[in-house]
Image (cartoon, grey):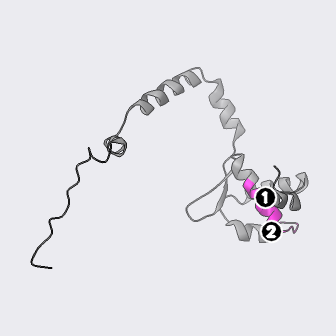
Amino acid sequence: MVNKEFLKFNPTLESVLMVERIIQKTSGTYTKYPLWKNLPKKMMYQTFCVIIDYLLDSGKIAFDKRRKVGWIYNPALVRKYLVRKDLSWKNETKIKSKVCRRKSKTSIRATQSPERRRVALPIPNPSIQ
């Protein structure tokens, strides 16, 4: 089912490219609202938010701790690492599977039944009552 609010603020390709270019130029300088204010052409804030959501979902931008927008998409770097023979997807899956098999003590405690968990309860002081 298509979200009706999304259809209301459907961005054009020209506006998406405009936002991409301004984020690339000013990466890490602005937060979301000031970035919208400094666009070369004005657009509705809701349309701008749809574009930002799209860029986040596609992995082209990210927000830092101070909520500043940064450009993180780098296809040349990806191509450089895909060519290398010592890096492969098979090695990555083996590493992940080994890590996933290990269980930390906290995860083991969380999976135990409540009656098996040992909990230190405070001893009530009868003089306080």
Above or below, 20 against 84 in this view is below
Label 2 environment density (alpha carbons within 10 Å; few <14, some 14–19, many ≥20): few
Quadrant containing the C terminus in the rendered view: bottom left
Q: Position of residue 102 (x, y in %)?
A: 38, 33
Q: Position of residue 68 (x, y in %)?
A: 63, 63
Looking at the rendered structure, the kind of residue marked 1 is: Val
The numbered dot on residue 45 is: 2
Q: Nearer the viewer, residue 125 or 73?
A: 125
Q: Nearer the viewer, residue 110 or 59?
A: 110
**Residue at image location 55% in from the left, 21% down from the top:** 90
The part of the chain drawn in magenta is: 38-53
| Element on which disc 2 rests | helix
Above or below, 64 against 100 in this view is below
Q: Report, in whole angstroms, how far the alpha carbon at label 2 lies from the one at label 1.
A: 9 Å
Label 1 environment density (alpha carbons within 10 Å; few <14, some 14–19, many ≥20): some
Q: Position of residue 38 (x, y in %)?
A: 79, 69
Q: In screen coordinates, is 87 left or right of 30?
A: left
Q: Position of residue 19 (x, y in %)?
A: 80, 58
Would residue 47 be counted in the magenta stretch? yes
Residue 69 appears in the rendering: yes
Q: Which residue is mark 1?
A: 50
Q: Are marks 2 and 1 in contact (CB under 8 Å)?
A: no
Q: Nearer the viewer, residue 4 or 116?
A: 116
**Residue at image location 68% in from the left, 46% down from the top:** 59
**Residue at image location 18% in from the left, 64% down from the top:** 122
